[in-house]
């Protein structure tokens, strides 16, 4: 699934992405660390892996979207 980075806190390594429908979804440090990223800037396109659905949606991986 693809999304757009919305917020990122480098101290906690957590933040939010916006799904393509505009829904914000939080990610935690474990999801950020799983992708091997060092930094994330608002507006960057990312690829995410998720578990659950709707209100229980949880991001398990955040990586940069590459073509």
Image (spheres, rainbow, N blue to C red):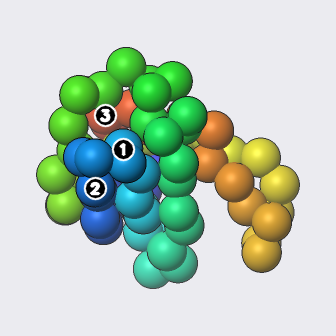
Between 37 and 23, the residue placed more toward the observer is 37
Q: Judging from the image, what secondary structure is the residue with disc 3 in?
A: strand
Q: How far apart are marks 2 and 1 (CA)?
A: 5 Å
Instruction: Please tell me whether residue 53 is drawn above or below residue 13 in the rendered image.
Output: below
> In the current view of this chain or complex, which residue is farthest to the top?
36
Instruction: Please tell me whether residue 19 is drawn above or below residue 48 in the rendered image.
Output: below
Tell which circle, 3 or 1, labels the residue nearer the N-terminal end: 1
Label 2: few (<14), some or many (≥20) within 10 Å? Answer: few
Dot label at residue 9: 2
Q: Give the image location of residue 22, x and y in percent.
A: 45, 80
Q: Judging from the image, what secondary structure is the residue with disc 2 in?
A: strand
Q: Give the image location of residue 17, x and y in percent.
A: 41, 62
Q: Is residue 39 left or right of residue 55?
A: left
Dot label at residue 13: 1
Q: Can residue 50 be seen in this view?
A: yes
Instruction: Please tell me whether residue 13 is drawn above or below residue 42 in the rendered image.
Output: above
Residue drawn at point x = 77 percent, y = 72 percent = 54
Tell which circle, 2 or 3, labels the residue nearer the N-terminal end: 2
Numbered disc total: 3
Q: Which of marks 3 and 1 is in front?
A: 1
Q: Give the image location of residue 7, x and y in percent.
A: 29, 65
Label 1: few (<14), some or many (≥20) within 10 Å? Answer: some
Dot label at residue 64: 3
Q: Distance between the residues labelled 2 and 3?
A: 17 Å
Between 53 and 29, the residue placed more toward the observer is 29
Q: Give the image location of residue 63, x and y in percent.
A: 39, 32
Query: Based on the displayed image, in which of its 4 quarters is residue 47 positioned?
Result: top left
Q: Is residue 20 visible?
A: no
Dot label at residue 51: none
Residue drawn at point x = 36 percent, y = 44 percent = 13
């Amino acid at each position: 699934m693809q999304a757009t980075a919305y917020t990122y806190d480098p101290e906690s390594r957590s933040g939010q992405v916006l799904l393509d429908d505009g829904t914000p979804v939080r990610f935690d440090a474990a999801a950020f660390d799983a992708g091997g990223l060092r930094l994330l800037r608002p507006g960057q396109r990312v690829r995410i892996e998720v578990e659950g659905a709707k209100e229980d949606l949880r991001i398990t991986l955040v990586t940069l979207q590459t073509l």
